[in-house]
Image (spheres, rainbow, N blue to C red):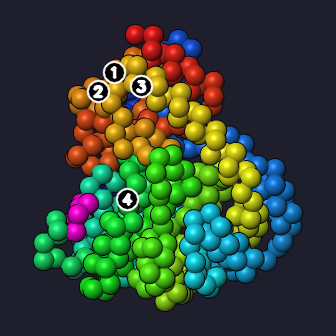
Amino acid sequence: MPARRRVSSLLPDFPWDTIASVKAKAAAYPGGIVDLSVGTPVDRVDPLIREALSSASAVPGYPATHGTPELRAAAVDSLTRRYGITGLDPAAVLPVIGTKELIAGLPRLLGLGADDLVVIPEVAYPTYEVGALLAGAQVARADGLTQLGPRTPALIFVNSPSNPTGRVLGVDHLRKVVEFARARDVVVASDECYLGLTWDGRAVSILDPEVSGGDHTNLLAVHSLSKTSNLAGYRAGFVAGDPALVAELLEVRKHAGMMMPFPIQAAMTAALGDDTHEAQQRERYRARRDVLRKALAAAGFRIDDSEAGLYLWSTRGEPCRTTLDWLADRGILAAPGDFYGPTGAEHVRIALTATDERIATAAQRLTAG
């Protein structure tokens, strides 16, 4: 009998395991650790959403993989209201069990394999690469299409606003990606989880009429409620765009039983229909960002990009692991930039996702010398 191949052998080391010793050092600091390494929400879920979750908790049957009509309509309405996306059919919306699982599974769901090339940003959320590796596909890091040479990819991942850098891609850049993809029949998956957290300038969706011309063919926009509605624990997200692609994803997911629990669908519907809680959460992050940004500048850091999102992409002009130790000596934990690709080797990603008290503590430690 042939030896079983371990899928984990295809993947890089889990990045967070590599900073265990630095985390222990930060945790030993008097007054405790200020963990700014992971972008996980710390603020409570709005009562409106919790009430919707509770109201649907007695439903005993299986939920629909495609989601309720109310959920899909709420998603379309929110994209139009919040981001100016028009011409989207509710049938071209599909709820997913957290956008990380969608991104990790998308190359396989699209049937990609060893002969296919997946393009990811040069500095990128690790799951884009993981998804390609799990499918056995090839991976190229490229921010510019000219970097690909004669190669034609099967899938291009776009992430604007970016995790980790907070960089925002302009309309012209995104339009060029769409034009390139259309000319070559390439799928573009745009991870837009931070679109609602733009601080400087304007961030647009791949589905925005200015980018797509109102034609969503081969375009997928991935949206999460983890950041703006604090629903990371609910695993609440959705993908929308090309009706044919969404129908294909739906068919595969129906066979695999990849369905979102009905109470979560009800909670999502409530969250997507209410802009007040989202605006309040955005302002909490804005205030925390202001405090941290000033303290980092006073401590000698340079902050690059960071026009949007939940992170400050920061550097002291030295290897990121050296900076990580410097922060840990002050009881602060960040994420090293080399998690996200070789060109991040002199940056650290500092998250805004801590309580006001912990953010204030981090600022005090940074400016204490």
Front residue of 244/27: it is 244
Residues under labels 2 and 3: Cα distance? 10 Å
Report which residue position mark 1 lands on.
Answer: 300
User: What residue is shown at x 82% (from left), y 73% (from top)?
Assistant: 60
Q: Where is residue 274 in the image (x, y as percent from the top left)?
A: 75, 59
Q: Magenta stretch?
A: 140-145
- Residue 108 on the magenta span: no
Residues under labels 3 and 4: Cα distance? 25 Å
* Label 4 residue SS: loop
Say whether residue 274 is visible: yes
Report which residue position mark 2 lands on.
Answer: 316
Q: Which of marks 4 and 2 is nearer the N terminus?
A: 4
Report which residue position mark 3 lands on.
Answer: 296
Q: Earlier in the sequence, mark 2 or mark 1?
A: 1
Look at label 4 and name its amino acid: Leu
Q: Which of marks 4 and 1 is nearer the N terminus?
A: 4
Quarter of the figure with the C terminus: top left
Report which residue position mark 4 lands on.
Answer: 169
Quarter of the figure with the N terminus: bottom left
Q: In this view, does 74 lie to the left or right of 198?
A: right
User: What residue is shown at x 42% (from left), y 33% (from top)?
Assistant: 334
Front residue of 53/289: it is 289
Look at label 3 and name its amino acid: Leu
